Amino acid sequence: MTPAPHSHRKLFMILASLRFSGGVTEALRLAEDLQARSIPVCLLILWRSEHEVPCPNLPVRYLSSFRTTDPARPLQYLYLLASFLLFACKDALIGGQRSIAVLLTHFSTFPFSWIVPWAQRYCFNQDIEWMFVPPGLPRRILRRIILATSRRSSVVTTSSHVDRLYRDHGVQSIGQAGIWARETWLQQPTATGRDIDVMMLVRRGRVKRLDLCHSVLDRLKEAGISTLAVAPDPEIHRGVLPLATHAVLCPTGDELRDLYRRSKIFLLLSDLEGFALPPLEAMGAGCVPLCRDCGGPRSYMDGPFAANLIPLDADPAHIVQRVEALLEDPVRLDVLSGQARQRFVEGIASSSRLRSACMDSLAQTLRLP
């Protein structure tokens, strides 16, 4: 029998913003799964974004009207901490200190749990985030913060790859969220065929390699290869307009599904990914993934797709050569397209079992004594 809502702690999931990203999407999915298990979940959002992921089925509270583009974000952070403390104290007075829990989704949210030591603490670790900053003292400090907080929390990871990375650093998880693309991404190819040679998701961030994306797009243009660049914000969109054959800003889910169906190859150029959903979503439509070996794609690019992992030290010329080799072998590309859809189907069942077990364990830890 499903426990009544009052038998669980109220869970505050803290997100830096609701901007369009794989990490935010997975956090919202986790919240929906917990809510389906009668756990009261509330999203606490630090900054507002121009383009936000809709979450109509979840209660949302913004801790400020600050924008992610504000240059004064470091100063705003102090206000956000104070705002959260007042909010948490008020809720604790109503329901009792033992009645609440916080779930941290990004390294910027970790300090929020330190100022409410009475709350049960969870970390949703989707990657080793200290690698997102350049080498040096800031990375070492961030690594210490993330690991120290994780070791004092109940940790949920996203995949066997990320789980192994944290185990290597002495952090044991209570389960893996079993990330996989939703079944809605599984589609038949279009009757008219695929008119786009290469599709790319072009994103901001040091490890997302916007510079490499620009360089490869420029070389693909010179080679006469048609490209599609999907951008999450207007500035990036403007940057790829002269380089890509097609450039799309923040497509809807239906539009993105159609773009996957029209594309032959999905190219991912990141230095580091905890999972990387877009190449997997593309596989559901038979779009063949070609990815730099950035970690996460290994979770699904096994078997015949292992050969499509590009070494991280490959230069733009080599990457374009790999693209050309696939496009010049349409028979192999067609076979891989069918195998991509099959791999997608196989993963739905296995990831579902893993996720269900993880959600049950997480729900159990949230039960009130």
Image: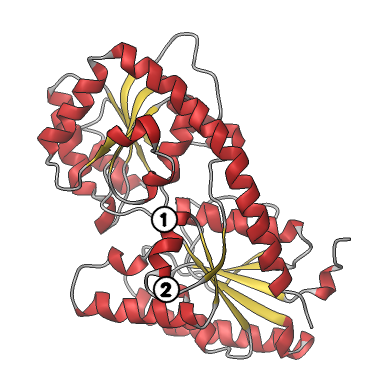
Pointer 1 or 2: first along the chain: 2
Report how far apart the C-alphas of labels 1 and 2 lie in the structure.
Answer: 23 Å
Q: Is residue 274 above or below residue 47?
A: above
Residue at 45% in and 24% down: 339
Outermost residue toward the front in this view: 303
SS at mark 1 in the image:
helix
Residue 236: percent from the left, percent from the top? Answer: 29, 46
Report the quarter where the C terminus lies.
bottom right
Mark 1, Cα crowd under 10 Å, few <14 / some 14-19 / many 20+, is some
Left or right position of 368 against 178: right
Residue 40: percent from the left, percent from the top? Answer: 74, 68
Which residue is identified by label 1? 161
Left or right position of 39 against 357: right
| Number of numbered discs overlaid on the protein picture | 2
Which residue is identified by label 2? 108
Q: Quadrant of residue 222?
A: top left
Residue 99 in view here: yes
Q: Is residue 354 above or below residue 305?
A: below
